[in-house]
Amino acid sequence: MRYFEDVEVGVRLELGEHHVSRDEIVRFASEWDPQPFHTDDAMAAASVFGGLTASSCHTYSISSLIFSRNPKRMAVAALLGSELRFPFPVRVDDVLQLSDRCSEKRLSASRPGVGIVRSRTVLTNQREEETFVMDASYLVQCRAT
Protein backbone atom coordinates (compact mmCIF):
# COMPACT_ATOMS: atom_id res chain seq x y z
CA MET A 1 0.00 0.00 0.00
CA ARG A 2 1.32 3.43 -0.91
CA TYR A 3 0.53 6.26 1.45
CA PHE A 4 0.61 9.95 0.60
CA GLU A 5 4.29 10.19 1.53
CA ASP A 6 5.14 7.29 -0.84
CA VAL A 7 3.54 8.85 -3.91
CA GLU A 8 6.11 10.47 -6.22
CA VAL A 9 5.10 13.14 -8.73
CA GLY A 10 5.96 12.15 -12.31
CA VAL A 11 6.73 8.48 -11.58
CA ARG A 12 4.77 5.97 -13.69
CA LEU A 13 3.80 2.76 -11.94
CA GLU A 14 2.79 -0.42 -13.76
CA LEU A 15 -0.05 -1.92 -11.71
CA GLY A 16 -0.87 -5.15 -13.53
CA GLU A 17 -2.66 -6.70 -16.46
CA HIS A 18 -5.84 -8.54 -17.38
CA HIS A 19 -6.72 -10.81 -20.30
CA VAL A 20 -10.25 -10.15 -21.63
CA SER A 21 -12.12 -13.17 -22.93
CA ARG A 22 -15.20 -13.30 -25.14
CA ASP A 23 -17.16 -15.02 -22.37
CA GLU A 24 -16.25 -12.28 -19.89
CA ILE A 25 -17.39 -9.53 -22.29
CA VAL A 26 -20.72 -11.24 -22.99
CA ARG A 27 -21.32 -12.22 -19.34
CA PHE A 28 -20.68 -8.69 -18.02
CA ALA A 29 -22.71 -7.00 -20.75
CA SER A 30 -25.63 -9.44 -20.43
CA GLU A 31 -26.11 -8.32 -16.85
CA TRP A 32 -24.99 -4.67 -16.87
CA ASP A 33 -25.03 -3.25 -20.43
CA PRO A 34 -26.94 -5.55 -22.81
CA GLN A 35 -26.22 -3.71 -26.06
CA PRO A 36 -25.99 -6.04 -29.09
CA PHE A 37 -22.39 -4.98 -29.92
CA HIS A 38 -21.43 -6.33 -26.47
CA THR A 39 -23.49 -9.54 -26.51
CA ASP A 40 -24.06 -10.78 -30.09
CA ASP A 41 -21.20 -11.63 -32.47
CA ALA A 42 -23.18 -11.14 -35.69
CA MET A 43 -24.74 -7.83 -34.62
CA ALA A 44 -21.37 -6.63 -33.30
CA ALA A 45 -19.72 -7.46 -36.63
CA ALA A 46 -22.34 -5.33 -38.43
CA SER A 47 -21.92 -2.44 -35.97
CA VAL A 48 -19.61 0.56 -36.19
CA PHE A 49 -17.15 -1.46 -34.03
CA GLY A 50 -16.88 -4.32 -36.54
CA GLY A 51 -16.83 -6.89 -33.73
CA LEU A 52 -17.60 -7.64 -30.12
CA THR A 53 -16.42 -4.97 -27.66
CA ALA A 54 -16.48 -4.61 -23.89
CA SER A 55 -18.79 -1.97 -22.48
CA SER A 56 -17.30 1.16 -20.95
CA CYS A 57 -18.66 0.01 -17.57
CA HIS A 58 -16.76 -3.25 -17.97
CA THR A 59 -13.59 -1.44 -19.03
CA TYR A 60 -13.73 0.77 -15.93
CA SER A 61 -14.39 -2.30 -13.78
CA ILE A 62 -11.29 -4.01 -15.18
CA SER A 63 -9.18 -1.00 -14.20
CA SER A 64 -10.67 -1.11 -10.70
CA LEU A 65 -10.01 -4.85 -10.41
CA ILE A 66 -6.35 -4.52 -11.42
CA PHE A 67 -5.89 -1.53 -9.10
CA SER A 68 -7.48 -3.23 -6.09
CA ARG A 69 -5.31 -6.34 -6.43
CA ASN A 70 -2.00 -4.47 -6.59
CA PRO A 71 0.03 -3.97 -3.41
CA LYS A 72 1.34 -0.65 -4.85
CA ARG A 73 -2.15 0.87 -4.91
CA MET A 74 -2.65 4.15 -3.09
CA ALA A 75 -4.31 4.19 0.31
CA VAL A 76 -7.31 6.05 -1.10
CA ALA A 77 -9.76 7.43 1.45
CA ALA A 78 -12.09 8.97 -1.16
CA LEU A 79 -12.39 9.81 -4.84
CA LEU A 80 -12.84 13.57 -5.13
CA GLY A 81 -13.57 13.76 -8.84
CA SER A 82 -12.66 12.22 -12.14
CA GLU A 83 -12.83 12.58 -15.90
CA LEU A 84 -13.07 9.34 -17.91
CA ARG A 85 -12.32 8.72 -21.58
CA PHE A 86 -12.49 5.54 -23.66
CA PRO A 87 -10.43 6.30 -26.81
CA PHE A 88 -10.32 2.72 -28.20
CA PRO A 89 -12.69 -0.19 -27.57
CA VAL A 90 -11.66 -3.26 -25.61
CA ARG A 91 -11.90 -6.36 -27.81
CA VAL A 92 -11.92 -10.12 -27.32
CA ASP A 93 -8.48 -11.43 -26.27
CA ASP A 94 -7.05 -8.01 -25.48
CA VAL A 95 -4.41 -8.03 -22.77
CA LEU A 96 -4.82 -4.80 -20.85
CA GLN A 97 -2.04 -3.14 -18.82
CA LEU A 98 -2.86 -0.60 -16.11
CA SER A 99 -0.49 2.23 -15.25
CA ASP A 100 -0.75 5.29 -13.03
CA ARG A 101 1.25 8.52 -12.90
CA CYS A 102 0.87 11.22 -10.23
CA SER A 103 0.80 14.73 -11.67
CA GLU A 104 0.59 16.65 -8.38
CA LYS A 105 0.12 16.20 -4.66
CA ARG A 106 -0.33 18.35 -1.57
CA LEU A 107 -1.38 17.92 2.03
CA SER A 108 -4.98 18.73 2.77
CA ALA A 109 -5.39 22.12 4.46
CA SER A 110 -8.69 21.14 6.09
CA ARG A 111 -8.32 17.44 6.88
CA PRO A 112 -5.37 16.25 8.96
CA GLY A 113 -3.92 12.86 8.09
CA VAL A 114 -4.69 12.98 4.37
CA GLY A 115 -3.27 14.49 1.23
CA ILE A 116 -4.73 15.25 -2.16
CA VAL A 117 -3.23 13.42 -5.12
CA ARG A 118 -4.04 14.08 -8.77
CA SER A 119 -3.13 11.30 -11.17
CA ARG A 120 -3.72 9.84 -14.61
CA THR A 121 -4.60 6.16 -14.81
CA VAL A 122 -4.34 4.49 -18.23
CA LEU A 123 -5.44 1.07 -19.46
CA THR A 124 -3.49 0.12 -22.61
CA ASN A 125 -3.96 -2.91 -24.85
CA GLN A 126 -1.24 -5.03 -26.47
CA ARG A 127 -1.35 -2.74 -29.53
CA GLU A 128 -0.41 0.18 -27.23
CA GLU A 129 -3.84 1.78 -27.74
CA GLU A 130 -5.30 3.57 -24.73
CA THR A 131 -8.65 1.94 -24.00
CA PHE A 132 -9.32 3.90 -20.80
CA VAL A 133 -7.90 7.15 -19.44
CA MET A 134 -8.93 8.57 -16.07
CA ASP A 135 -7.73 11.88 -14.68
CA ALA A 136 -8.73 11.91 -11.03
CA SER A 137 -8.18 13.55 -7.66
CA TYR A 138 -8.11 11.46 -4.50
CA LEU A 139 -7.88 11.89 -0.76
CA VAL A 140 -4.97 9.62 0.18
CA GLN A 141 -4.16 8.58 3.71
CA CYS A 142 -0.89 9.70 5.28
CA ARG A 143 1.22 7.25 7.24
CA ALA A 144 0.31 7.01 10.89
CA THR A 145 2.92 8.77 13.01
Image (spheres, rainbow, N blue to C red):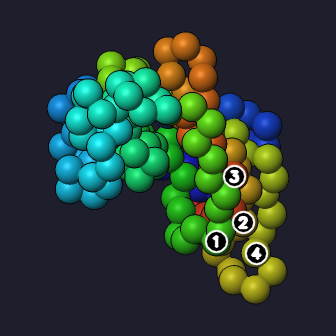
Q: Amino acid at mark 1?
A: Leu
Q: Amino acid at mark 2?
A: Ile
Which residue sits at x=42%, y=33%? Answer: 47
Where residue 78 sits: x, y (%)? 55, 71
The residue carrying pointer 3 sits among few (fewer than 14), some (14 to 19) or many (20 or more) residues within 10 Å by Cα, namely some
Which residue is tagged 1?
80
Q: 19 or 1, which lies in front? A: 19
Q: Give the CA separation, mark 1 to mark 2.
A: 9 Å
Question: In this rendering, is residue 40 above or below 51?
Answer: below
The residue carrying pointer 2 sits among few (fewer than 14), some (14 to 19) or many (20 or more) residues within 10 Å by Cα, namely many
Which residue is tagged 4?
108
Residue 21 in the figure: left or right of residue 114: left
Circles 3 and 4: CB distance less than 8 Å?
A: no
Circle 3 or circle 4, nearest the eye: 3
Of helix, strand and loop, which one carries label 1? strand
Q: Amino acid at mark 4?
A: Ser
Circle 1 or circle 2, nearest the eye: 1
